Amino acid sequence: MKIFLTGGTGFVGRAIVAELLRRSHEPLALVRRGSEFKLGAIADTERIRIISGDILKPETYAATLREAEAVIHLVGILREFGRVRFDLMHRVATENIVRESELAGVQRYVHMSACGVGRLSKSVGLKTKLAGEKAVRASRLNWTIFRPSVIFGPGDGFAHFFMKRFRRLPVAPLISRGRTLFQPIAVEDVARVFLDAAERQDIGGKTFEIGGRGIFHFKQIFDDISAAMEKRILEVPTPRFLLAMMAFFLDRFRFFPISRDQLRMLASDNCCDSLEYIEIFGIEPRDFREGLRALAKEI
């Protein structure tokens, strides 16, 4: 199959491109000019067809989209910088790719959303993700939506991110005493279900929340990272209001590790009922602690 992919140079995108190649599909990867090098670590890079374009400018990819049998839309951001805003990347970008996919007659459309979308939340990121989902549901496409919990793997913005920081400074801020719940899922498992969905015609019109088998408090995650790294990590209870005050002044700078919107997301648990997708896709999610031990060997 020819599968058109947005967000292919990102953390999840690279894993999906690798899975596409493993299954002998032809990836048509929409890539911002200058970002092509991010695909360089993938074996068989010469089999990836790169389309230099901009998700916000349909004229840069509409012609190629007409060749595709399926679309996997991954574009999304965790925080805003400059002109890169949640509404643009989550709602407008989705409306663009949905409209162009309809015009191109695409047979399958698979959409990346996020766990927590649709729940009561003050997070602008989650609200704009919901607006993107609404555009998908209102379309004539044979669509499937996935809402992953936090995703772990080499190069992630979660467990691997913390591990690299703890190598230099083994201090972990415990927000809300570390009680927020997470259900980490391996990036390889995410790639597998996305590709399974693209290949199947029988799960159109469905939304799946996806997570791993285990549910962990934030404090448990830091404890497990400490065990995997065989390194003592100082866990410091940090009042949310203090971080919010710091983020108010500093979250426009990339060096500051958390934004105000990410703090809003952390106000609620990030877990789901995964039984449906595990049964439908016949997957046994990778054990999180096993994944941590593997990541510890790479840093």
Image (cartoon, helix red, strand yellow):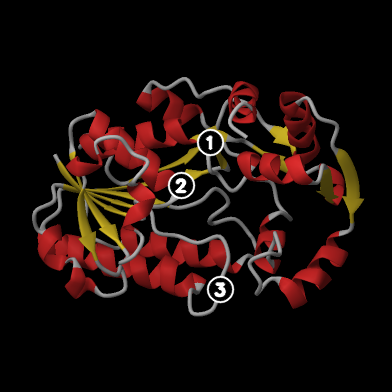
**Which of the two residues, 47 or 121, is positioned nearer the viewer here?**
47
Q: Which residue is mark 2?
A: 11
* Residue 192 drawn at (x, y percent): 36, 31
Q: Nearer the viewer, residue 250 or 114?
A: 250
- How crowded is the residue under tag 1: few (<14 C-alpha within 10 Å), some, or many (20+)? many
Q: Are the residues at dot 3 and dot 2 in contact (C-beta closer than 8 Å)?
A: no
Pointer 3 or 1: first along the chain: 3
Q: Position of residue 190 (x, y in %)?
A: 43, 36
Q: Secondary structure at mark 3?
A: loop
Q: Amino acid at mark 1?
A: Gly
Q: Which residue is mark 1?
A: 153
Q: Is residue 94 left or right of residue 235?
A: left
Pick whichever of labels 3 and 2 is earlier in the sequence: 2
Instruction: Judge the density around disc 2: few (<14), some (14-19), many (≥20) Cα neighbours within 10 Å.
Output: some
Asked whether disc 2 touches disc 1, contact meaning CB atoms under 8 Å apart, the reply is yes
Q: Is residue 280 above or below residue 133?
A: above
